[in-house]
Image: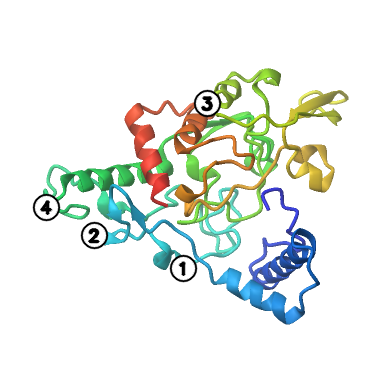
Amino acid sequence: MFDGRETLKPLNNAATFDANLKYDLMDQASSAVTGHAQGQPPTEQQLAEIVEFEMALTTAQARDNQAGSLQKHGATGGPLDLAGQQYYPGANDVLGGDPTGAKFSPNVFSLYAKWKKPGVNGRRYDGRDDWEDRERNSAREDIAAGEVLFNTHPLTITNVRGLNDNVSLGSPASFSGTCTTCHDSPNVGNHSTALPLDIATSRLAGYESDTAIVASLRQLSAPDLPVFEITGCPDPANPGKTITYYTSDPGKGLVTGQCADVNRGKGPILRGLAARAPYFHNGAAANLDELVNFYNERFQMNLTHKEKQQLVAFLNAL
């Protein structure tokens, strides 16, 4: 769950990860059967079989309408390669929590490197190219370019609760990152450890003073949702004073009851993204164009129209 309500045992330790994940999934399955479905409590064997089925599932886009197969000419899109992707808690953690000691690399996605446009000295028809289909070749080039943008295009991270107030980063008011600062799990795109963030998707433009947040929220066709007023929270910037939050979804704060967790939610896995509109936990972005426009304004990416198209092409190919 995006707000962490089903995480009953911690998932940040590699030694206990498998056992704790199975425990959490079994509890979630039991709650779904007896709650949502209003059925009889499942047996331990039934729960084990449900979890075994869930853990065997791998979801990823296998084909693109313009680029064709996402496994052709050396590309490694699709569910088969994803099933073999190594994962462990803390893998490539931006906060330095990788248990192997490896440093964070922003090059999180490496699915479409073979589809990059050949350089001046490269062979004209190589990698992504089909002799008979130049439009398909162009689509593959855009996907590869979008992957590079996702990994490397700079953005300015400000006013993100969970990052800008994170002591592990020195609580910077602002710092430069990329999309993979938050989406750091290799070729998957969620955060490899529990790091719920508030990027402002639950906020309302009319109550915001941050111009970047206001501009980003205006890119979304968010549904009309109830507005909650949360008062009496300590103001981190002004000790001894309080702050009021206006939100359409308090997020993890509803689970913990802590002011520090208001609006914070986990970043989702990005594979299979094309089939999962609308986007964000509250459905605020109707499509990937709105999503990219939100991030472009929110983190001052200054993307060109072509770069936006390339990012959307890449996200559609996950």
Residue that carries the numbered disc 4 in the rendered image: 131
Q: CA distance from mark 2 to mark 1?
A: 19 Å
Query: Which of these two is toward me, 111 or 251?
Result: 251
Q: Secondary structure at mark 1?
A: helix
Question: Which comes sooner in the sequence, label 3 or label 1?
Answer: 1
Taking the spot 28% from the left edge, 54% from the top edge, the residue there is 68
Looking at the image, do the residues carrying marks 2 and 1 touch, with CB atoms under 8 Å apart?
no
Q: Secondary structure at mark 3?
A: loop
Looking at the image, do the residues carrying marks 3 and 1 touch, with CB atoms under 8 Å apart?
no
On screen, residue 20 above or below 148: below
Residue that carries the numbered disc 2 in the rendered image: 73
Question: Which comes sooner in the sequence, label 2 or label 3?
Answer: 2
On screen, residue 292 above or below 185: above
Viewer-nearest of discs 2 and 3 = 3
On screen, residue 121 above or below 210: below
Picture quadrant where residue 89 is located: bottom right
Q: Position of residue 63 (x, y in %)?
A: 34, 56
Q: Amino acid at mark 1?
A: Ala
Q: Amino acid at mark 2?
A: His
Q: Residues within 10 Å of mark 3 (few under 14, many from 20)?
A: many
Residue that carries the numbered disc 1 in the rendered image: 83
Taking the spot 33% from the left edge, 45% from the top edge, the residue there is 143
Query: Which of these two is toward me, 27 or 238?
Result: 27
Q: Amino acid at mark 4?
A: Trp
